[in-house]
Amino acid sequence: MQKLQKKMSREAKEGVIAVSGNDIKTSFIEVNCETDFVAKNDDFIIFVKELSDLNNLCSSNLNKLNNTQMKNGKSVEDNLVALIAKIGEKITIGRTKTLEHENCINFIYQHSVIKDNVSKLAVITTLFKNKPIDDLEIFGKQLSMHIAASNPIALIPDNISNEIINKEQELIAEELKNSGKPEEIAKKISLGKINKFKEENSLLTQDWVMEPKKKVKDILNELGLDKDTIKDFVRIKIGE
């Protein structure tokens, strides 16, 4: 027990993300460890893959997941303790999320894949089924790849939280403090920088990765779709 407590006091910033489910209900789970070597260990990957399927069944309810039985008849919690003892590193369950929306379809993109549904970065994008599936299929996959590369914070600028905006304003103010510019000019520069920050971090106003001269909203218009087609999205990367 003392050895386990000692391990659990260490940092676990490496790990993997596993995605499970189908295009109606899709879940991801992050499992952290201390080294990239363990993140590629067979015992670790086998555990993560089974855990990922159970997480989707539990709809990312962590309490329920911890008490769920695995194939060997023991709970997730007990298997996790046994795996830590076997591998000798701190292992923790990190972020989890399930996307399931009525009349919607999910698209998955994974980058830096280690094995099957286990990777270092994952994106789930949810689109309303307001067009034939074939029309949405290509766009859904491309949009997921775009999100992986561009890491938007929100769908539109107004959806970026005040906390994030305030933090960015503080950074800009600090940058301009010693610039020697008159207050009115500094205010205009600050406003311009904030507007640019919002535009670059909102999905609809980002440059489309596949054709950077266009915005994501332009691609939607060309396909006869509106912004409400994008119901939800989530991007998760190990180390972020």
Image (cartoon, helix red, strand yellow):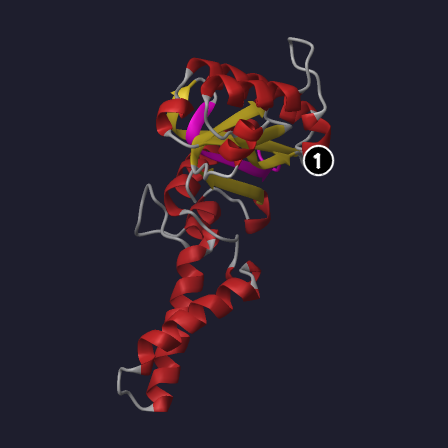
Between 83 and 23, the one lying in front of the other is 83
Q: Predominant secondary structure in magenta?
A: strand
Residue 8 against residue 154 in the figure, above or below: above
- Res 224 visible: yes
Q: In this picture, which residue range is highlighted in magenta?
A: 118-132
The N terminus: image quadrant? top right
Residue at the location (57% across, 38% down)?
Answer: 127
Q: Name the side, left or right, on which 107 lies relative to 182.
A: right
Q: Circle 1: is it few (<14), some (14-19), or many (20+) Cα within 10 Å? A: few
Residue 164 against residue 59 in the figure, above or below: below
Q: Amino acid at mark 1?
A: Glu
Residue 206 against residue 99 in the figure, above or below: below
The C terminus: image quadrant? top left
Q: Position of residue 150 (x, y in %)?
A: 38, 47
Residue 109 against residue 218 in the figure, above or below: above
Q: Position of residue 130 (x, y in %)?
A: 61, 38
